[in-house]
Amino acid sequence: GQQVMQIPQYQHVQEGEDFTTYCNSSTTLSNIQWYKQRPGGHPVFLIQLVKSGEVKKQKRLTFQFGEAKKNSSLHITATQTTDVGTYFCAGRRGSSNTGKLIFGQGTTLQVKP
Amino acid sequence: DTGVSQNPRHKITKRGQNVTFRCDPISEHNRLYWYRQTLGQGPEFLTYFQNEAQLEKSRLLSDRFSAERPKGSFSTLEIQRTEQGDSAMYLCASSPRLSTLEVDTQYFGPGTRLTVL
């Protein structure tokens, strides 16, 4: 079945360092979303990418969707302690814009002050 | 708008017992999703409703699991004859009506943590 893989599983950085997590799908995705889950919390929507090669920025966060719509990345510049949490990518297959999301395993980010 | 709510927040049960969880979506959201999350993993899709119609159900879901959304508002997820492997966080999410070109985003509730002894 379709899988969405994320690497790395864990990342420890010093505050101020950059961080990147990568997401890869075995099949083409119609769109990809990113969520953040704080320890003990629930996933919170960050952004969605729909177009091939799309790049979106939210302050220190940069999101990319690959040309083939099979991979994505999230890059955080100059991490802060408030960035701590687990970042999940989630995609939909085919041309669907609703329905089942397939989540990656997540990348847990720890930031040392 | 108070967001998606789930009850109970925690449930401890003995193996073999039945449990039922409730999800109240954000008002006016017509789509409702159930996911299961275990430690160190991402949410795993279980089932999805549009209004009262159950449109998709995971093949991973055994016959012991059933979900309903009778009036297109709140939803219940029942697990019969619980097993220790059912221990997980059960997450509910809802999403609003969309125009044709929009992509739906999901708003998650706090989850119900199930522990099967």
Image (tube, rainbow, N blue to C red):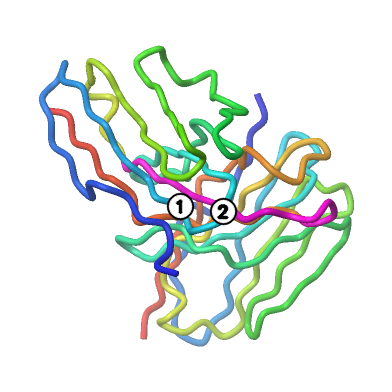
Q: Quadrant of residue A12?
A: bottom left
Residue B98 counted in the magenta span: yes
> Label 2 near label 1: C-beta < 8 Å?
yes
- Pinpoint residue B102: horizontal percent, then vertical percent: 78, 57
Quadrant for the N terminus of chain A, please: top right
Q: Nearer the viewer, residue A64 or B79?
A: B79
In the image: residue A11, left or right of residue B10:
right
Identity of the residue furthest to the top in this view:
B63
Q: State the residue at coordinates (51%, 40%).
A: B72
Residue A104 counted in the magenta span: no
Q: Quadrant of residue B98?
A: bottom right
- Pinpoint residue B31: horizontal percent, then vertical percent: 58, 45
Could you confirm whether marks 1 and 2 are on the same chain?
Answer: yes
Give the vertical position of B19 relative to A14 (above or below): above
Question: Residue type at mark 1?
Answer: Pro
**Mark 1 highlights which residue?**
B25
Residues rendered magenta in the picture: B89-102
In the image: residue B117, left or right of residue A11:
left
Q: Quadrant of residue A110?
A: bottom left
Chain to which mark 2 belongs: B
**Mark 2 highlights which residue?**
B29
In the image: residue A93, left or right of residue B37:
right
Quadrant for the C terminus of chain A, please: bottom left
**Secondary element at tag 2:** loop
**Total labels drawn:** 2
